[in-house]
Amino acid sequence: MKSIKTYFVPILILFLAVSPSLYAQKDLQINKVFEQYGEKKGVTMVDMTNEMLDGYDFSLFKSITIKNNPPAADFIRKCLEKDQEGARKVKQVMANGVLTSVYLQLPRKGQLYRLILFNQSFQQENKITLIYIESKNDSENILKLILKKK
C-alpha cells in the first residue's frame, strides 16, 4: 500500500500543477483547429509548456501553420469569430473583404492572460498561422516580448 501512495501522490501533484494550463484553451473554438488539423500532412504544429518557455515567461504556447488549405482557413475564421465574442481587445486586418490578421486579447483564465494571433498570407503558399499564448504577463507585454525576440 505504501508503494502506491509513493507513486500516486507525486503524480497527483504533477497533474494538478499542469492541468490548469492544459485546459485553459479547451473552452475556445480554436482548440478544434489544433485537434482537427494538428497531425495532418503539410501542417506544422508546435505545443510548448513550462521549462521550454523560460525565456519568454509563457506558461503555454501553441501554434499551427497550414499551407494551401482554403477550407482550413474558413474553419479557422469561423472559430475566431466565436472566440472573438468574449475578447477584451480585438484588432483585425481585412483585405478584399477577407480577414487576414487578427489579434484577440481574451478574458483572463485565473491568473493567466490569453492571447490569440492569426495571420493568412496569400503569397505563393497561401500560408495560415494561428498562435495561442498563455502567460502571467499582460498581453501587451507578451506582444512586446515577441517583437523584441525577433
Image (cartoon, rainbow, N blue to C red):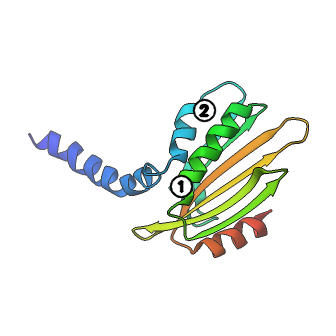
Q: Is residue 31 above or below residue 61?
A: above
Circle 1 sits in a helix, a strand or a loop, which is it? Answer: helix
Mark found first going from the N terminus, 2 or 1: 2
Instruction: Bin the neighbour count of mark 2 within 10 Å (Cα to Cα): few under 14, some 14-19, many 20 and up.
Output: some
**In this picture, residue 45 sits left or right of residue 29:** right
Q: The residue tagged with tag 2: helix, strand or loop? A: helix
Residue bearing mark 2: 37
- The three-letter code of the residue at mark 1 reads Asp
The picture places residue 16, in percent across and down from the top left corner, at 31, 55
Q: Which of the numbered marks, if any, corresponds to residue 61? A: none
Residue farthest top in this picture: 41
Residue at image point 72% right, 28% down: 42
Label 1 Cα crowd, 10 Å radius (few <14 / some 14-19 / many 20+): some
Tell me the amino acid under the disc marked 2. Answer: Tyr
Q: Pointer 1: what residue?
A: 83
**Residue 25, above or below 149:** above
Q: From what the image shows, is residue 62 above or below residue 105?
A: above
Residue displayed at 86% across by 35% down:
125
Q: Quadrant of the C terminus?
A: bottom right
Which residue occupies the extreme right position in the image?
Answer: 124
- Give the side of residue 127 with respect to residue 50, left or right: right
As drawn, which residue projects farthest toward the left?
1
Query: Is the C-beta separation of discs 2 and 1 under 8 Å?
Result: no
Foreground mark, 2 or 1? 1
Q: Position of residue 98 (x, y in %)?
A: 77, 49
Could you tell me residue 53's position as x and y percent?
59, 58
In this view, the residue in front, 66 or 22, is 66
Rendered-image quadrant of the N terminus: top left
Q: Measure how far apart labels 2 and 1 are at the Cα level.
A: 18 Å
